[in-house]
Amino acid sequence: MKKLLLSTALSVAVAGAAFAQSPSAPSTSDSTPAAKSESSGKTNFVSSQKPDQWLASKFKGTDVLGSDNQKIGDVSDILFDKTGKIEAYVISVGGFLGVGAKEVALAPSSFDLVPGQNGAANKLKIAATKDELTNAQTFARYEPPRPTATTGSGSTTGSGMKPSGTTK
């Protein structure tokens, strides 16, 4: 139940943060483009954060504890799909002050929420050790294909030479 609540709360927080960052004026007609969302036809505003919801900005950096309750890393990013569903939490493991660390990604169901003690921040716990995460496959961030590079600033002919009439 905690995992479901955490995943749902984070999905709402990520979507809510996106809406909260873009100003919009109230509309008097549902037929105006500002009053409609592309996906559902309705604009649903979230007026405030609830106690069981986390903002992505505050969630980043959350300590991750291993099966031995020792810190093994922290949340460096959140992977979600175009519908806002969280697919994975990206965890930075190893290294010193971020240097030499590697990233691994784990599904939200891999985590349990551990309440902070004496006012400390909440933590996430997984059933793995630091060694298991260190030896896990490194998370590969998507890199869009690069356009093919051309030489020079002008257009070229089929022979690779600049068209006649240009000077250098």
Image (cartoon, grey):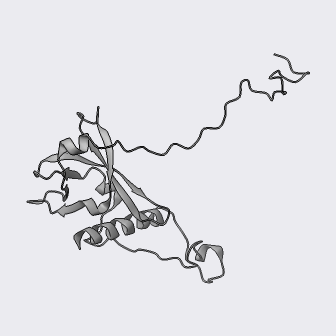
Answer left or right for 23 relative to 34.
left
The residue that appears at 20% across and 62% down in the rendered structure is 112
Residue extending farthest to the left is: 118
**Left or right, residue 111 beside residue 151:** left
Residues 145 and 43: in front is: 145
The answer to which of 35 and 64 lies nearer the viewer is 64
* Residue 90 horizontal/vertical position (percent): 33, 50
Instruction: Pinpoint residue 30: horizontal percent, then vertical percent.
Output: 62, 83
Q: Nearer the viewer, residue 159 or 79?
A: 159
Look at the picture and state if 133 lies above or below 5: above
Total number of numbered labels?
0
In this view, the residue farthest toward the top is 168
At x 32%, y 46%, the residue is: 104
Q: Quadrant of residue 117?
A: bottom left
Residue 159 percent coordinates (x, y): 83, 23
Residue nearest the viewer, comparing 15 with 106: 106
**What residue occupies the far bottom of the structure in this picture?**
29
Residue 60 location in percent, x, y? Answer: 31, 52
Which quadrant does the C terminus fall into? top right
Above or below, 113 against 94 in this view is below
Residue name at image x 73 percent, y 23 percent: 152
64 over 151 or under it: above or below: below
The quadrant in which the N terminus is found is bottom left
Residue 22 higher or lower than 95, as above or below: below
